[in-house]
């Protein structure tokens, strides 16, 4: 049967600027001054050390389960640095580095991970959604915000963070399709860290890249070295500018690797071998940026030690402040607040039941003290 051949654009570009040895491709390097360069390093180091402190406290039983960011700092800092304060960030559950850059206080994150919702309060000045655990919901939320921005003729842009596993969810494809049809000002940023918990990248999809999934929705898609903060920054700047100018969405695939556990409830030694981890440790983002900055004489051992000390002090002060806050958060009844404009009867019953249980517990304590 005679047929007509349709030839869609099937090209996927790849961008890398800073290699593992700390050397750059001068022709692709974005324009960044010394303050921005050292600012990237400080932000990535700050996220790494905060991550380590969180893990230490979690193992002591002082914090709940969380998802470490180690190994993915460049993908987050490089992308979030391309945004204005008026732009929006829609994180998944691992975007600690991005949220710290946006101004989320360490004190609040400590409190939140200790199980107190009060720590998750977002400042009115931050156009950020809270960290979200369900896999693949973030693109839909980001697309909804972006659609509202376009409807209001605003010039803000939204960045949605998610992992490689989320590209197997229907939500991801629905968001991509809608955003493309309506040319929504959103950047879909996929951190392909090679593992969706224990499912490897090659079991997620037969696609050669995740970036090529953009082609089906007629939007630009690019794959970047996700451990190269300059490549991520350059690609995101381009995508953000396109979205702000009315050019619609972009899919960016950041090829990276999580060097730690998926979450603190996970044991990656059960499904990945140490050789793979060691291979990616040689490609890790913080070390290659440090090598580059040392070659420019912007970093040396003395400056790094000073940075380490400042960050350590900031983290410890935040933990002390969070600990003091948590000592004051003694009323579990606040869980019923701010849910409904008019509290329904079933919630009132639950609140009263809790109050009775709490009062009975206090009477038992008082009885034990008097005995």
Image (cartoon, rainbow, N blue to C red):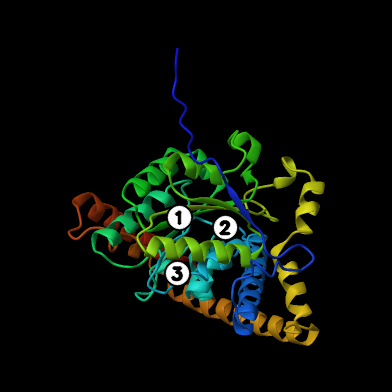
Instruction: Relative to 268, say whether 359 is above or below.
Output: below
Residue 351 at x, y = what percent? 29, 57
Mark 3 sits on what residue?
119
Residue drawn 48% across and 42% down?
Answer: 215
Residue drawn 77% across and 62% down?
Answer: 20
Q: Secondary structure at mark 2?
A: loop
User: Is 348 situated left or right of 92 in this image?
Assistant: left
Label 3 to label 2: alpha-carbon separation? 14 Å
**First in sequence: mark 3 or mark 2?**
2
Query: Which of the 4 image quarters holds residue 292?
Result: bottom right
Residue 365 at x, y = what percent? 46, 66
Are the two marked residues, 2 and 1, in contact with CB atoms closer than 8 angstroms?
no
Residue drawn 53% across and 69% down?
Answer: 110
How many marks do you count on the picture?
A: 3
What is the quadrant of the N terminus in the image?
top left
Label 3 to label 1: alpha-carbon separation? 15 Å
Question: Which residue is more in the foreground, 6 or 364?
Answer: 6
Residue 200 at x, y = what percent? 65, 40
Q: Secondary structure at mark 1?
A: loop
Are the two marked residues, 3 and 1, in contact with CB atoms closer than 8 angstroms?
no
Residue 227 at x, y = what percent? 67, 60
Residue 132, which numbered label?
A: 1
Mark 3 or 1: the one toward you:
1
Instruction: Relative to 146, say whether 134 is above or below.
Output: above
Mark 2 sits on what residue?
66
């Amino acid at each position: 049967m005679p047929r007509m051949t349709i030839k869609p654009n099937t090209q996927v570009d790849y961008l890398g600027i800073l290699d593992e040895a700390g050397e750059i491709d001068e022709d692709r390097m974005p324009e960044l001054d010394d303050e921005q360069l050292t600012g990237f390093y400080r932000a990535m180091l700050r996220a790494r050390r905060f991550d380590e402190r969180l893990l230490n406290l979690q193992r002591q039983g002082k914090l709940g389960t969380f998802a470490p960011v180690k190994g993915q700092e460049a993908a987050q800092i490089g992308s979030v640095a391309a945004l204005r304060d008026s732009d929006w960030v829609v994180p998944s559950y691992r975007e600690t580095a991005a949220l710290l850059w946006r101004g989320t206080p360490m004190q609040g994150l400590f409190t939140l991970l200790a199980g107190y919702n009060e720590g998750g309060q977002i400042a009115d000045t931050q156009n950020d959604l809270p960290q979200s655990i369900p896999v693949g919901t973030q693109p839909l939320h980001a697309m909804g915000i972006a659609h509202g921005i376009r409807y209001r003729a605003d010039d803000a842009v939204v960045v949605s963070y998610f992992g490689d596993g989320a590209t197997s969810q229907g939500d991801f494809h629905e968001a991509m399709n809608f955003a493309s049809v309506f040319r929504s000002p959103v950047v879909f940023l996929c951190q392909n860290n090679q593992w969706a918990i224990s499912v490897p990248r090659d079991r997620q999809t037969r696609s050669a890249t995740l970036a090529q999934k953009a082609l089906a929705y007629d939007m630009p898609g690019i794959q970047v070295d996700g451990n190269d903060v300059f490549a991520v920054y350059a690609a995101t700047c381009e995508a953000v500018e396109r979205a702000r100018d009315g050019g619609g969405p972009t899919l960016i695939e950041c090829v990276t690797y999580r060097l730690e556990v998926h979450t603190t409830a996970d044991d990656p030694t059960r499904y990945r071998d140490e050789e793979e981890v060691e291979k990616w440790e040689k490609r890790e983002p913080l070390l290659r940026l440090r090598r580059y900055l040392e070659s420019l004489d912007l970093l040396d051992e003395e400056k790094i030690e000073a940075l380490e000390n400042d960050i350590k002090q900031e983290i410890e002060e935040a933990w002390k402040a969070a600990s003091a806050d948590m000592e004051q958060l003694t009323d579990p009844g606040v869980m019923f607040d701010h849910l409904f404009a008019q509290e329904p009867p079933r919630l009132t019953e639950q609140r009263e039941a809790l109050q009775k249980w709490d009062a009975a517990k206090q009477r038992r304590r008082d009885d034990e003290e008097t005995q």
